Amino acid sequence: MREAKQFYIDGQWVDPAPGSTLLDVINPATEAPMGRIAMGGAADVAKAAKAAHTAFQSFGRTSRAERLDLLAAIAGEYQKRYPEIAAAITEEMGAPAWLASQAQAALGVAHFQTAIAVLKDYEFDEERGGTLITKEPIGVCGFITPWNWPINQIACKVAPALAVGCTMVLKPSEVAPFNAILFAEILHAAGVPKGVFNLVNGDGPTVGAAISSHPLVDMVSFTGSTRAGIEVARNAAPTVKRVSQELGGKSPNIVLDTADLQKAVAGSVQRMMMNSGQSCNAPSRMFVPAAKMEQAKAIAKTAAEGLTVGDPNGNHTLGPVVSEAQFNKIQGLIQKGIDEGATLVAGGPGRPEGLDKGYYVKPTVFADVTNDMTIAREEIFGPVLAMLAYDNLEQAIEEGNDTPYGLAAYVQGPEAEARDVARRLRAGQVILNAASPDFMAPFGGYKQSGNGREWGDHGFTDFLEVKAVIGWKAAEAAE
């Protein structure tokens, strides 16, 4: 049984303010408690924000070389704890052990390595005539992070913020908090100065709201649902702080008529189902030429039924979804797809055969979906794929863009045609032909998928203020 009854504030582990309660953290594979954490409140956030504000007075003036050394030390300490981080993620949110090690934990260290690479050559100053335009750290950052890719979303905020000289208060998800506890221990071991990084556990309506509304917090970076993101923005509005958000998605995946159908459909099913479909950028709406829909159904059925579901510590493709609440939501939406007349190609309601405990969901594929159906509109956040037919490419692009979201989009087909389609899709990131992730590429969304960008050099922007110093360089004397 893991326990985290203290918070990391001002360089040490401290007891919560009076009135704190304990929360059981549930292992989604067993439905039993695997740990307990203390739940913080506004007083704990105030203490952490004050510590971060004080620390910023010195950390904000550190040199590039000092911060590069610090980031390298963190990356080194992270590698020492790498197996522990992967194991914690498997236990608390159900990611299969292979995925937790090869992707979930790997992304955490990758963001620090990326921040180091960017910081080495990042231009903070620019002279334009006699004016200096300089980029300075924004100050105290509030981070509110999710459970689905937990260490990834922590690291992709913390690494660039540290790189530019910001201090911070983190509220990780209370659903999957123990990887964040390990992360705090890593930063402490790496010698992060006291007050620079602070962690307070708790829920969104209490700790999240306190962070986003606190006057000493200069900006908030939030990753989560669009509904919660709206509340973060509302709470931040009275203090007019910057708000950066990476929110929900319902990403279109257009399979061109000229694509290799077998490769495109089978690969897309696997990508959709990874992490049990719990990815905001999952390719959840597959657009297929109407004339090829029957063939695509057969390919998708075979691909989905080839995925194994079970104990995340075993050799399975998918583990459970994260919680009972998510399981019930997904089951309700699967039933909604059936009720609204979509064709069930694979999967369906209930747990997979042989699994009577744990929040396991069958890899589910619907076809003959229309873009007005609930399963085509709402973010399901589970292993559920909607296949939509199109008669012509204009229809596919129009319906692909017909969503309140705009986080990601996918195109499968010959390079030239795929590139042309990519330019017409309203999404912050378009992935062509299953291209590998690019850590230097900006990540973020259009429309209700958020604002701001993370990853690479674009990930520095939200943590910087721009100052113009006019008269920096005296005008040359007239001849």
Image (tube, rainbow, N blue to C red):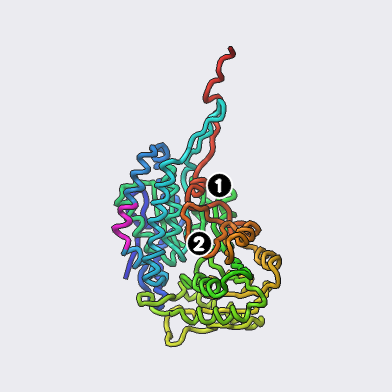
Q: Secondary structure of the magenta portion, mostly?
A: helix
Q: Nearer the viewer, residue 105 or 9?
A: 105
Q: Amino acid at mark 1?
A: Lys
Which residue is drawn at the image coordinates 34% and 51% (left, top)?
A: 74
Which label number is shown at residue 241? 1
Q: Is residue 373 magenta?
A: no
Q: Is residue 16 something one can see in this rendering?
A: yes
Q: Look at the image and give the residue range highlighted in magenta.
A: 75-82
Q: Amino acid at mark 2?
A: Ala
Rounded to the nearest angstrom, the CA distance separating label 1 from label 2 is: 36 Å
Q: The N terminus appears in which quarter of the rendering?
A: bottom left
- Residue, disc 2: 435
How crowded pointer 1 is (Cα within 10 Å; few <14, some 14-19, many 20+) is rated as: many
Q: SS class of the residue under badge 2?
A: loop
Q: Is residue 228 something one can see in this rendering?
A: no
Residue 314 at what x, y percent from top left? 35, 77
387 relative to 208, above or below: below
Residue 472 at what x, y percent from top left? 52, 25
